[in-house]
Image (tube, rainbow, N blue to C red):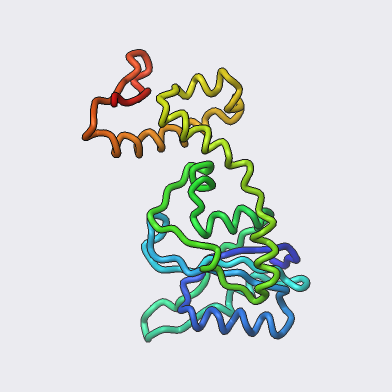
Amino acid sequence: MRTRRRISNISYNTVDFFENIIKELYNSHNIEWCYWILHKADTDDTKNHIHFVLQPSGSIDTFQLHDLFIQPVDYNVKPLCVTSKWFFTNSLDDWLLYVIHYKPYLLSKGLTRNIFYDFNDIKSTDEDALKYDINAIDTTKYNRLNIIKDAVNNKIPFATLVQNGQIPINLRTQYQFQYKELQKLKYAENRKKGFIQIDKETAEIIGFTD
């Protein structure tokens, strides 16, 4: 497949090998830039891996690109490489927020992780471009998480948020997941302090006694 679009993938190469390939691609003007970050094994993957996104300088063959990352290890051992599937990365904001495991973003997607990162952990072939893209991220759409946090802390039922228009009806399922996840955290913090209040009709946790 040939493409000019921004693409991303996951690499299982050693860091040195991976960075050398990226350096070659950049110096030969095959890519305009590349951002990458090393992730330790977590709930989504049992191996250390590198998330990366790159912008081709022109039309690029993803099959040939894949083959550049084949890294021989030992005899009878499967070579290290990137995954076989390349992803079109339309939203750079989403990629940047995901790879640092930004909590409000993960909750909005129904995801959880145990390890979290910082924008400073992301490397780039163009540091100025990376700083520009990080500063351009719009996180306002995740502000509803603060509303949900306050609701859980103040024992306000999720249905009330919907009725008051604080949570759009078409996003109810998405934000209800966040509400329940925060309730679980609140439960863990308060289970030694008092009793859980249960809604008799829905069997949902609606609050905690002090």
Tell which of 43 and 72 is nearer to you: 43
Question: Along the line of sight, which residue is nearer the eye, 45 or 110?
Answer: 110
The residue under the point 57% across, 65% down is 9
Residue 198 placement, left or right of 80: left
**Residue reaching furthest front?**
210
**Location of residue 78 in the rendering, given as x and y in whole percent from the top left corner:** 41, 76
Q: Is residue 106 visible?
A: yes
Residue 116's place in the image compared with 201, above or below, is: below
Q: Which of 91 and 69 is in front in this view?
A: 91
Q: Where is residue 199 in the image (x, y as percent from the top left)?
A: 35, 17
Viewer-nearest residue: 173 or 80: 173
- Is 107 above or below relative to 133? above
Dividing the picture into quadrants, the one containing residue 75 is bottom left
- Image quadrant where one finds the C terminus: top left
- Picture residue at 40% right of the left edge, 24% below the top: 155
Relative to 55, residue 91 above or below: above
Question: Can residue 84 be seen at all in this image of the molecule?
Answer: no
Residue at the farthest right position: 58
In this figure, what is the number of numbered marks?
Answer: 0
- On screen, residue 156 versus residue 174, left or right, reads left
Task: Indicate the position of residue 132 as horizontal and vertical percent values.
Answer: 70, 64
In the image, is 100 to the left or to the right of 182?
Answer: right
Residue found 38% across the figure and 85% down from its top: 74
Residue at position x 40%, y 66% in the image: 40
Query: Residue extending furthest left?
Result: 192
Quadrant position of the N terminus in the picture: bottom right
Direction from residue 155 to residue 191 in the image, left or right = left
Percent x, y for residue 60?
72, 72
User: Which of the 4 quarters of the picture holds residue 203?
Assistant: top left
